[in-house]
Image (tube, helix red, strand yellow):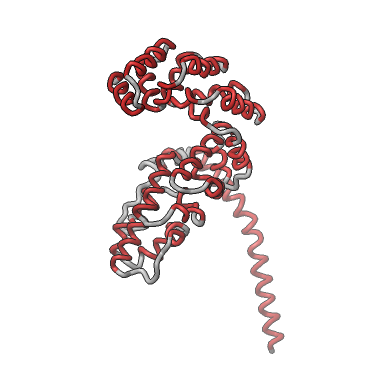
Amino acid sequence: MLIQSVLEHSRKLHIEPSDVCMCLRGLKGLGFSDETVVKILEGFPRVITMRLRDVEGRIEFLKGLRISWREIDGICYSFPLVLGLGVEKRLKPLFKEFGSLGFDGNVVRNEIIVNPEILGMEVGELSRCLELLKGLKCRAPIEEKILEKGYFRAGFEVKRRVDCLCRHGMILREAFKVVQREPRVILYDVEDIEKKIEFLKHKMGFGVGCLNGVPEYLGVNFDKQIVLRHNVLEYLRSKGGLGCEVGLRGMIKPSRLRFYNLYVKPYPECEEIFGRFSKDKEVRPRHPGGLWKLFKPPKYPDTEEDIRNMKLFMESISDPLEAVLPHFHEQKHEQRELVGKNQQ
């Protein structure tokens, strides 16, 4: 793999293989593993043209953060571009911003080990992402899940989603608005978001700009909601069953039950496509069979003493009633006689 990488990059950069071999010896001399050297040449081939002391400067800066050599090797393996970042003009201002935001050095160090791409952030990016998080308007469980691992991790996750939207043609300001209006997008993996955008552009025929009006598209489930609804509408469109064109808003905004009543229930053949609220669909019990027996109170047999106590209690109730009932019937009889005399 090393030999193949040397030949590929020497041809790409029009340099002699001997210069590439010299760079390889320098990286190996610093202590990088073979796998990391290959990743560096693949992800950051410009390292071949760099001076060795410049590479050492980046490594010394990482060591100053109390990052071990094994962790530095892993960071360069995951994010080779770190070797191309200037220490004075890029890394130091970035860490100064982290400190001004109130993040401890240990927090920053641990987050860099988990996500080395943090070192590639521009100065000011994290501040803007944290402002977005402080202005979130969503349900409390969603907000708790977003901030579960702290504001630093949440801010970086916002940055990744914004970059994903910008890669697909959205400008930075619009990308921030979409994430702010649909915070659930922060909980989805970037791969899932890209899959939704690809489906939106190539399968549904919409542009990425439609997300400005319907950001909820990125917050719903892809397989259970987007694909099923699209298949139903495509079937009705092919059969001429749609009276008017249904846009992205009309597909995503309605609840599951409303969508079912509008587009599925009137057409029995769509039941099989949609798969939800179907009459033939088997409803699985929420709890295993027989679980109710565990919550049923135990039944104890009545003893002779219990029966005797119940009889005594019933007799004590019946005695006052027997004394009161005759007097009650006499009053009723007198009232009837009085009513009869008045009528006469």
Using the image, determine if residue 52 lies above or below residue 186: above
**Coordinates of residue 160 in the picture (x, y in percent):** 49, 38
Left of 203 or right of it: where is 182? Answer: right
Give whichever of 339, 89 is nearer the camera.
89
Give the total number of marks visible in the rendering: 0
**Coordinates of residue 250 in the picture (x, y in percent):** 44, 62
In the rendered image, the residue lying farthest to the top is: 29
Using the image, determine if residue 112 lies above or below residue 196: above
Left of 93 or right of it: where is 35? Answer: left
In the rendered image, the residue lying farthest to the bottom is: 344
Q: Quadrant of residue 265?
A: bottom left
Give whichever of 70, 273 is nearer the camera.
70
Using the image, determine if residue 119 lies above or below residue 328: above
Residue visible at 31% across and 19% down? 2
Give whichever of 224, 128 is nearer the camera.
128
In this orientation, does residue 299 appear? no
**Coordinates of residue 236 in the picture (x, y in percent):** 32, 65
Task: Assign the N terminus to one quadrant of the image.
Answer: top left
Give whichever of 139, 136 is nearer the camera.
136
Residue visible at 38% across and 71% down? 243
Q: Quadrant of residue 96?
A: top right
